[in-house]
Image (tube, rainbow, N blue to C red):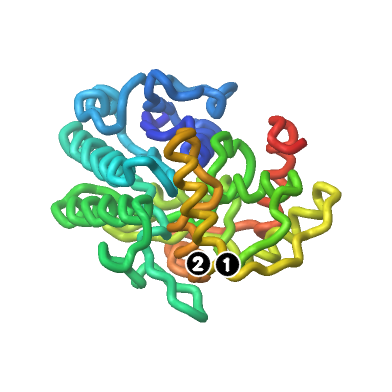
Amino acid sequence: MSTPVLVTGASGFVGSAVARALVARGDDVRVLLRESSSRRNIEGIDCRVVIGDMRNAKDVTKAMEGVRHVFHVAADYRLWAKDPTEIVRNNLEGARAVMEAARATGVERIVYTSSVAALKPVAGRAVDETSRHDEKTVIGAYKKSKLVAERLVERLAGEGLPVVIVSPSTPIGPRDVKPTPTGRIIVEAANGRMPAFVDTGLNLVHVDDVAAGHLLALDKGRIGENYILGGEDVRLRDMLALVAPLVGRKPPRVRLPRAPLYPLAFGAEAFARLSGKEPFLTVDALKMSKYFMYFSSAKAKTELGFQARPFVRGIEDAIRWFRQAGYIR
């Protein structure tokens, strides 16, 4: 008999991958979507759509009726907004509504999708789940939102809520519809619009491996524990060097200092306030780029059996999907 499962955020990048993985293993999947959400990422998969808002306790409670397991993947994933407090409010209120509804309806197990954004990078090494930010050290509204929401979930786990936390690093791969900030880098580079780079690094992981990690956390994770779901630590220049030949371009070779870019970032944000479109270059992104976002998934590997394919497979799959979807000219 299939297990009834609810997934929030299935219209998005990671959420759709989680929903697809659950359907593939035979679970009875329902997804919570807003009326305005695109259904592009769930086309062709056998799931039931429930209309509602993750921040609305009544909507979420109704969606959870008869459900055994919940994956709360939905998040406001923006690195910039006209009103930054909106990002914090959305992600905190969403986490609270979903967790309280799960407790009220007696859900057996919840997997909450946090982010390595809530972890504090340390120069010269990959950090694990113990390297924790606080509200004074975290940079930007998105990271703050994931931090405060994660702390709420941890507190509820301490009170007996059966929730496991997972922290994806930087997912890449197919179905990045929006696209995500990293997906935008791939698209811009593939279209020849990134002639230079800043010296930074990030941890890249295939989105389908992140989805598999969610299922492992459901089956094997310890209540209240946090598991990084990451892949390989990669310098931005090396990532761009991989993208270029896949689209027949030469990789950028000019390394830019950050200081001269700040006026451009301020200008881009000023224009964004008028246009309403999220800028590609932001002040917070420049501040974050000073740190190499390197992370260790050793705990997830040991306790969950998590594995990640080489990150180059994620780059290849992302470019293939972006090209087919018309993002790359």
Q: Secondary structure at mark 2?
A: loop
The image shows residue 124 at horizontal and vertical percentages of: 51, 81
- The CA span between labels 1 and 2 is 6 Å
Of residues 78 and 146, which is closer to you in this image?
78
Residue tagged by mark 1?
A: 201
Mark 1: few/some/many CA within 10 Å (<14, 14-19, 20+): some
Discs 1, 2 touching: Cβ within 8 Å:
yes
The image shows residue 192 at horizontal and vertical percentages of: 75, 48
* Residue found 24% across the figure and 51% down from its top: 153
The image shows residue 173 at horizontal and vertical percentages of: 63, 45
* Residue found 50% across the figure and 50% down from its top: 267
Q: Type of residue at label 1?
A: Gly
Instruction: Name the side, left or right, on which 112 lies relative to 126.
Output: left
Q: Secondary structure at mark 1?
A: strand
Of residues 67 and 134, which is closer to you in this image?
134
Of residues 263 and 101, which is closer to you in this image?
263
Image quadrant holding the N terminus, namely top left
* Residue 293 disc label: 2
Image quadrant holding the C terminus, namely top right
* Residue found 74% across the figure and 47% down from its top: 190
Report whether residue 25 is seen. no
Instruction: Name the side, left or right, on which 312 lies relative to 179.
Output: right
* Residue 270 disc label: none
* Residue 33 position (above or below residue 282): above
- In this view, the residue farthest toward the right is 248
* Residue found 67% across the figure and 44% down from its top: 187
Query: Tag count in the figure?
Result: 2
Q: Type of residue at label 2?
A: Met
Dot placed on the residue nearer the N-terminal end, 1 or 2? 1
